Image (cartoon, rainbow, N blue to C red):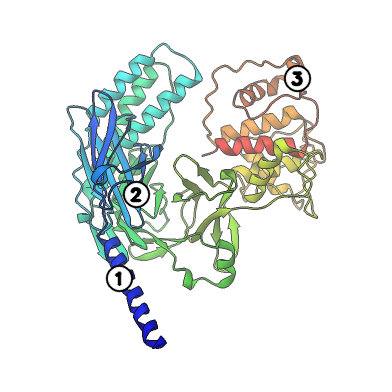
């Protein structure tokens, strides 16, 4: 009897699970997006099939990729809901609506000028269905016309904020002109892998658009007294397809040559798993043979194929495997240290610190190597880094720390963030010695590591820098890059503690050598002891102060001749790191 009763209860439980599963599979959410031009609002309405009083999470991303709105609302009568938020310019908005497990809808909405019209496209719903995009993009002429009106309003103003605003406007215009969205009809899906072949005319049209917009807007910015430096990028966006583990995009090779000849800085492919942006000459070699196509692929690695020691370190974090092919032949390394820029999603969990999120290269020997230039963007929820080779990569929080940095609370986060990227290191026995003085060669090593200036061909002829010294390659690389010129008498000053003004000067020269954006207009010194600052360091200290990279020592004093500590050096290096692209 007991056995029979148990069997009945099991059957009832299985039926309940089956019914629950069926109901979950039938659950869905509808999304409609419209723009209210009179109020400049994006209005989102729809219905969730699970009825009234259900939590609905809405995320809205503006055309730049920045998170515009993140909110949670409750469904009303009959499961209906409505939400609105202010628009932030023309372009493609992405709206993610989440109504519970398995109930998701991603909508792409193109908000154009009143003459251009607008459209929206739905994808990624709970049933896995996608619809074809009907994107209507603005012409280069229209983009130029819209931005020109905004630039006219800024004529006559001269300040750093104005320059930054103009730069952001130009960057947005370039992105709008050069973005191509490929709908799902152009994607060949086999199981969990998708293949995309970008047509020549599509890529050529985007290149021409970017060139036309940049040429016109560069001239207009010069007319109002601004020199703008922005990357000219062609963006290929592939619509999100649920369940994919690998995506490969094939590009015609002759279009890379066309992009280079037209001054395009990068061609970016957003696969959904990651965005891979390559320089046009990334695949350059000396063979001079004709190349038909290049292929970029990214795969979310099956963790069952990873060894135990790798799994122990990455925990639940995804591992991405990047590959490239030229006419079917695999290529692992590229032309130029920053030939490839990769962007991947990363969701912070409770307790994680944004500046301590580090990307690691996992080599063939299963060793983890930190990528020094990686940066996490809290706004977009993405981490970006540059490299010159493809392999496996994973992002996670670095937990590197030292037992003696609690006393320098103002520098603790900087030290840990830089040490996690292997830009700086301790002095042994888990100590950092934050109050210890820094020698000139020690700071140069930190600086060269931070900027990636290492050059194995560089040489130095200072009398006190011998070729067999541990610091030779760092001093030589810095000398070649124009960062150092010695202390006189053909000496570098090996073993001498670095002064605060020399540290600021070297840091400033490194910024300029790296082509970093410096928005400071007013370069006047404001420190009370400015008369004690050497003339060669004046501009560097003024700019570094305005950029909040350096500060005084109290009483509005800079103390230029005092020696810098390791903690102070870490603060300056971290400020530089944040400015480097």
Mark 3 vs mark 1: give the one in front.
1
- Front residue of 401 and 541: 401
Residue drawn at (20%, 55%) of the image = 185
Q: Which residue matches tag 2?
A: 98
In the depicted structure, whether residue 280 falls above or below residue 119: below
Q: Pointer 3 and pointer 1: residues touching (CB < 8 Å)?
A: no
Q: Pointer 2 and pointer 1: residues touching (CB < 8 Å)?
A: no
Mark pair 3, 1: CA separation: 73 Å
Question: Which quadrant of the figure contains the N terminus?
Answer: bottom left
Q: Quadrant of residue 307?
A: bottom right
Q: Position of residue 245 (x, y in %)?
A: 37, 63
Mark 3 vs mark 2: give the one in front.
2
Residue drawn at (36%, 62%) of the image = 246
- Front residue of 282 and 528: 528
Q: Which residue matches tag 3?
A: 557
In the depicted structure, whether residue 66 falls above or below residue 317: above
- Front residue of 194 and 483: 194
Dot 3: within a 10 Å radius of its alpha carbon, few (fewer than 14), some, or many (20 or more) residues? some
Q: Is residue 267 left or right of residue 578?
A: left
Q: Residue furthest top?
A: 156
Mark pair 2, 1: CA separation: 23 Å
Q: Is residue 412 left or right of residue 205?
A: right
Mark pair 3, 2: CA separation: 54 Å
Q: Quadrant of residue 444?
A: top right
């Amino acid at each position: 009897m007991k056995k029979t009763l148990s069997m009945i209860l099991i059957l009832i439980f299985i039926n309940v699970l089956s019914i629950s599963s069926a109901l979950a599979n039938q659950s869905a959410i509808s999304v409609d997006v419209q723009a209210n031009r009179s109020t400049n609002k994006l209005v989102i309405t729809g219905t969730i099939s699970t009825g009234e009083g259900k939590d609905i999470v809405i995320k809205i991303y503006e055309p730049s990729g920045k998170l515009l709105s993140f909110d949670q609302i409750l469904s009303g009568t009959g499961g209906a809901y409505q939400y609105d938020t202010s628009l932030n310019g023309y372009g493609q908005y992405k709206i993610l609506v989440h109504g519970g497990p398995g109930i998701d809808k991603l909508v792409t909405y193109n908000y154009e000028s009143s003459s251009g019209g607008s459209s929206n496209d739905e994808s990624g719903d709970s049933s896995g269905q996608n619809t074809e995009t009907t994107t209507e993009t603005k012409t280069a002429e229209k983009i130029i016309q819209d931005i020109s009106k905004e630039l006219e309003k800024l004529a006559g103003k001269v300040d750093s904020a104005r320059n930054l605003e103009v730069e952001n406007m130009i960057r947005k215009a370039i992105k709008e002109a050069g973005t191509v969205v490929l709908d799902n009809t152009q994607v060949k899906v086999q199981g969990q892998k998708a293949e995309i072949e970008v047509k020549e005319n599509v890529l050529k049209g985007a290149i021409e658009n970017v060139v036309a917009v940049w040429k016109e807007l560069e001239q207009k910015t010069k007319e109002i007294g601004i020199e703008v430096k922005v990357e000219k990028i062609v963006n290929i966006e592939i619509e999100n397809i649920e369940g994919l583990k690998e995506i490969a995009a094939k590009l015609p090779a002759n279009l890379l040559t066309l992009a280079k000849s037209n001054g395009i800085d990068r061609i970016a492919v957003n696969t959904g798993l990651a965005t891979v942006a390559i320089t046009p000459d990334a695949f350059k070699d000396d063979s001079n043979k004709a190349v038909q196509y290049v292929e970029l692929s990214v795969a979310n690695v099956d963790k069952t194929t990873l060894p135990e020691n790798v799994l122990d370190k990455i925990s639940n974090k995804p591992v991405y495997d990047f590959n490239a092919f030229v006419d079917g032949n695999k290529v692992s390394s590229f032309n130029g240290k920053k030939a490839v820029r990769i962007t991947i999603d990363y969701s912070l969990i409770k307790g994680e610190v944004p500046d301590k999120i580090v990307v690691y290269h996992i080599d063939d020997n299963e060793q983890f190597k930190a990528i020094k230039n990686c940066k996490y963007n809290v706004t977009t929820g993405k981490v970006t880094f540059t490299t010159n080779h493809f392999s496996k990569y994973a992002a996670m929080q670095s937990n590197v720390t030292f037992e003696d940095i609690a006393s320098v609370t103002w520098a603790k986060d900087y030290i840990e963030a830089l040490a996690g990227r292997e830009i700086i290191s301790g002095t042994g026995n888990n100590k950092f010695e934050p109050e210890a003085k820094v020698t000139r060669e020690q700071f140069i090593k930190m600086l060269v590591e931070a900027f990636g200036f290492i050059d194995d061909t560089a040489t130095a002829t200072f009398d006190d820098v011998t070729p067999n010294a541990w610091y030779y390659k760092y001093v030589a690389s810095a000398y070649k890059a124009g960062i150092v010129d010695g202390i006189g008498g053909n000496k570098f000053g090996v073993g001498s503690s670095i002064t605060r003004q020399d540290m600021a000067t070297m840091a400033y020269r490194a910024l300029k050598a790296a082509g970093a954006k410096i928005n400071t207009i007013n370069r006047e010194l404001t420190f009370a002891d400015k008369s004690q600052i050497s003339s060669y360091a004046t501009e560097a200290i003024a700019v570094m102060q305005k950029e909040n990279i350096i500060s005084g020592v109290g009483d509005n004093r800079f103390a230029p001749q005092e020696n810098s500590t390791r903690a102070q050096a870490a603060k300056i290096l971290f400020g530089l790191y944040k400015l480097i692209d």
